[in-house]
Image: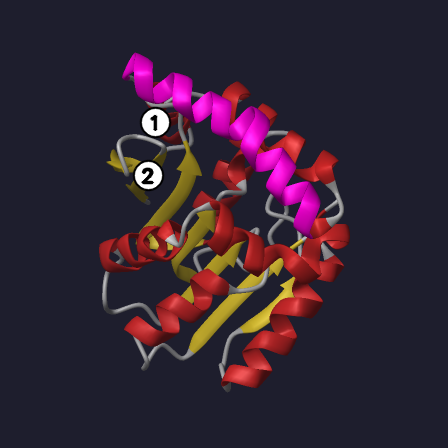
Amino acid sequence: MFDRIAKRYDLLNRILSLGIDRSWRKRLVAKAPRNAAHIVDLATGTGDVLLAFENHYPGTPTLSGYDLSAGMVAEGVKKCQRLGSRANLMIGDAANIPVANDEADIVSMSFGIRNVPDVSKVLDDIHRILKPGGSVLILEFTMPKLWLLSWGYKVYFRHVLPFVGGLISGDRHAYTYLNRTVEDFADKEAFLQLMTDANFKNTQATSLTFGIASLYYGQK
C-alpha cells in the first residue's frame, strides 16, 4: 500500500496536515539530546525526520533510516540525494532492526508504531539497540479528549481525508486505512504502559495540536 502512494506521499502529508507535520517533527527533534553520534529512524518513509535531525544537529555523523516499503525508501533516497543529505535510507523491519545492541543514541519513529503487528516487540527491539541512557522519541496520532474536537476529528479522518487523499494519490483505500488505525490505536496512558513494560524509564507524553497527536519520550 505504501509503495502505491510513495510518489505523492510528501505532497499529501503537507496538504492533509495543513503543514502542521513539519512543526511536529521540529518538536520531536528539539526534545532529543544534542550529543548524539548515531540516530536511527524507523518507519522512516521518505526520510523527513532524519532531514530534520540533520538540519538541527549538522554534526551528527550517522543518520540511519529503515522502512519496509521499497517505494518509500526509493523516493527518500532520491530526495536525500537532491538535498545533499548524509542520511542513509534502507529497507528494514522495525521489529527486527538491523543494528547492533547498544549502538544508537536516539531512536525515533513517526506515525508508524500503530502500523506494526506487535507494538511490544518493536519497543523491545528499540530498547535493545539503544545505548544505556539513549532516548526514544515516538510521534503518533491520538484521539482528542474534548467531545466537539473528537467529533470534528472523526469527520475529517473518516470522510475528508479519504476523499482528498484518494483524489490526489489515486488510492482511496490507503487513506481509509489511516483513520481506522488511528481510532484503533492505544491511548496515551496505555502506550506509556507499553513503554514501561519494555523497560523504558522517565517516560512521558506531550500532547500536540489540541491532542490530535502525541510525542512520547523514554530513556534506556
In the image: residue 216, left or right of residue 184: left
At x 31% / y 12%, what residue is drawn? 147
Whether tag 1 and tag 2 are in contact, CB under 8 A, the answer is yes
- Name the residue tied to disc 1: 192
Q: Is residue 164 found inside the magenta-colored segment of the image? A: yes
In the image: residue 126, left or right of residue 218: right
Occupied quadrant, residue 7? bottom right
Alpha carbon separation for disc pair 1 and 2: 8 Å
At x 45% / y 66%, what residue is drawn? 50
**Disc 2 residue crowd, few under 14, some 14–19, many 20+, Cα 10 Å:** many
At x 29% / y 72%, what residue is drawn? 56
Magenta span covers which residues? 146-168
In the rendered view, tell whether residue 146 sits above or below residue 87. Answer: above
Query: Label 1 amino acid?
Result: Leu
Mark yes or no: residue 98 visible.
Answer: no
Q: Which quadrant of the figure contains the N terminus?
A: top right
Occupied quadrant, residue 36? bottom left
- Name the residue tied to disc 2: 216
Along the line of sight, the residue nearer the viewer: 84 or 200: 84
**Disc 1 residue crowd, few under 14, some 14–19, many 20+, Cα 10 Å:** some
User: Most prominent secondary structure in the magenta stretch?
Assistant: helix
In the image: residue 122, left or right of residue 172: left
Q: Position of residue 214 (x, y in %)?
A: 33, 36
Occupied quadrant, residue 49? bottom left
Instruction: Count up the numbered dots.
Output: 2
In the rendered view, tell whether residue 59 sits above or below residue 171. Answer: below
Q: Position of residue 219 (x, y in %)?
A: 29, 45
Is disc 2 placed on a helix, strand or loop? strand
In the rendered view, tell whether residue 48 sits above or below residue 161. Answer: below
